[in-house]
């Protein structure tokens, strides 16, 4: 069975929803127009309960099946990115400097499409909790929802989510039975020496050689401290120092993104980061301040739920289009907090060729929305069978 017939019939309406969302991108927790649009659609759809203002601008909506049973959580993120859009689409962003460049407009649309079908048919035993979350890109809206107690409050026993994947063929699903995406930590380092004239380095403490030595030595965490078969990324992503060709600057700063999977590697890299930066600072006679923030934990699928989700995906897209052993990637995702709270699975859904995620020319492919909606709908019907 490919896309559910009734959902295929909803495709034009879903395209309209998606394009409205695309024209009105909002950031982080500040999603007043997006949340109002979603709540309005949920009212039209006729879900049983709508709880607004969860994690500021998130929404939890409930649809009850024709028989009693457990509650399954389906999640969509709603936030956009601070990027100037370059798609040239006639439904391009109307909010300067903001854009749906990660396809969360598509994710929200898929979940609304599934909601419409599930509210019409109710062919399941239990309850569906639709989790529309803010602040996936930055701010950890998923964590806030979990901390606000949505899992307990709505009795959610399992959770599922989808992210679109450009350049994976349209309708193909990929997931993994276990760790899927990395933990992400961020470090900021400020280096202070003694500035002065570029012609008198001996009277200064130049922060530039200290910073370059730190950046170079940090590369040895992956090459020399890590067990060679483990995964780790240490990327210095910004260096800011200096203002003129004849001035030795007083200070500078750099930052890094650090991606890992296990608590052991995560602790090792944090310890080595401090040792290398502080030791190098001592050697060069500069002062350092390090801010090291732990961000999203790794995204870890429950093996059994991932297998089950892949079975459902095969029903929609065919066996050859689904891989449940796709391996890990070093991206991060705050659905990880929901998967820490409840067993479940996260899947990637191909949207075909096009610009990559977070690129100003990226655009969600509307043809993928009915596929994702059908997946969510069948997942509910199979996880919570009637009778
Ligand atoms: Zn993103
Ligand atoms: Zn995203």
Image (tube, helix red, strand yellow):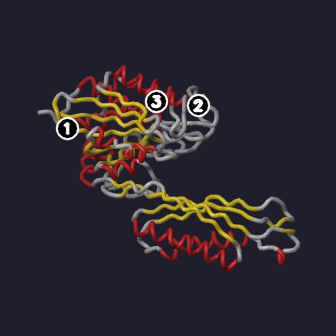
Determine which residue is flagged by label 2. Answer: 93
Q: Which mark is residue 35?
A: 3
Image marks 2 and 1: residues in contact by CB distance under 8 Å:
no
Marked residue nearer the N-terminal end (3 or 1): 3
For the residue pair 238 and 71, the one nearer the viewer reads as 71
Q: Mark 3 packing: few (<14 Cα in 10 Å), some, or many (20+)?
A: many
Q: Left or right? Give the position of 272 relative to 320.
A: right
Image x and y of residue 320, in percent: 31, 47
The residue under the point 44% across, 45% down is: 165
For the residue pair 59 and 310, the one nearer the viewer reads as 59
Marked residue nearer the N-terminal end (2 or 1): 2
Image x and y of residue 110, in percent: 38, 33
- The answer to whether 19 is drawn above or below residue 178 in the figure is above
Disc 2 vs disc 3: which is toward the camera? 3
The residue under the point 41% across, 71% down is: 229
Determine which residue is flagged by label 1. Answer: 384
- The answer to whether 84 is drawn above or below residue 13 in the figure is below
């Amino acid at each position: 069975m490919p896309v559910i017939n009734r959902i295929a019939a909803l495709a034009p309406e879903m395209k309209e929803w998606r394009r409205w969302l695309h024209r009105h991108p909002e950031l982080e927790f500040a999603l007043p127009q997006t949340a109002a649009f979603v709540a309005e659609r949920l009212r039209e759809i006729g879900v049983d309960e709508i709880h607004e203002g969860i994690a500021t601008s998130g929404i939890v909506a409930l649809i009850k099946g024709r028989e009693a049973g457990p509650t399954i959580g389906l999640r969509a993120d709603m936030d956009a990115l601070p990027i100037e859009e370059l798609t040239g689409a006639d439904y391009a962003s109307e909010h300067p400097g903001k854009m749906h460049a990660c396809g969360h407009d598509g994710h929200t649309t898929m979940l609304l499409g599934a909601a419409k079908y599930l509210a019409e048919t109710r062919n399941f035993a239990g309850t569906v909790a639709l989790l529309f979350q803010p602040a996936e890109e930055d701010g950890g809206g998923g964590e806030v929802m979990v901390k606000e107690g949505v899992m307990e409050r709505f009795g959610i026993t399992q959770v599922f989510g989808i992210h679109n994947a450009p350049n994976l063929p349209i309708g193909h699903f990929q997931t993994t039975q276990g760790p899927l995406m990395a933990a992400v930590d961020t470090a900021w380092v400020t280096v202070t020496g003694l500035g002065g004239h570029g012609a008198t380095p001996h009277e200064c403490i130049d922060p530039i050689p200290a910073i370059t030595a730190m950046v170079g030595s940090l590369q040895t965490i992956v090459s020399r401290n890590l067990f060679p078969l483990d995964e780790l990324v240490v990327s210095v992503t910004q260096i800011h120092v200096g203002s003129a060709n004849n001035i030795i600057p007083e200070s500078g700063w750099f930052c890094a993104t650090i991606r890992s999977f296990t608590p052991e590697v995560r602790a090792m890299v944090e310890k080595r980061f401090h040792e290398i930066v502080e030791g190098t600072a001592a050697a060069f006679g500069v002062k350092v301040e390090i801010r090291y923030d732990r961000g999203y934990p790794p995204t870890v699928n429950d093996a059994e739920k991932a297998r089950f989700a892949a079975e459902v995906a095969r029903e929609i897209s065919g066996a050859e289009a689904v891989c449940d052993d796709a391996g890990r990637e070093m991206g991060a995702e705050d659905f990880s907090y929901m998967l820490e709270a409840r067993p479940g699975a996260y899947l990637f859904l191909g949207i075909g060729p096009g610009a990559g995620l977070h690129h100003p020319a990226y655009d969600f492919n509307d043809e993928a929305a009915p596929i994702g909606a059908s997946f969510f709908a069948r997942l509910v019907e199979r996880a919570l069978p009637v009778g």
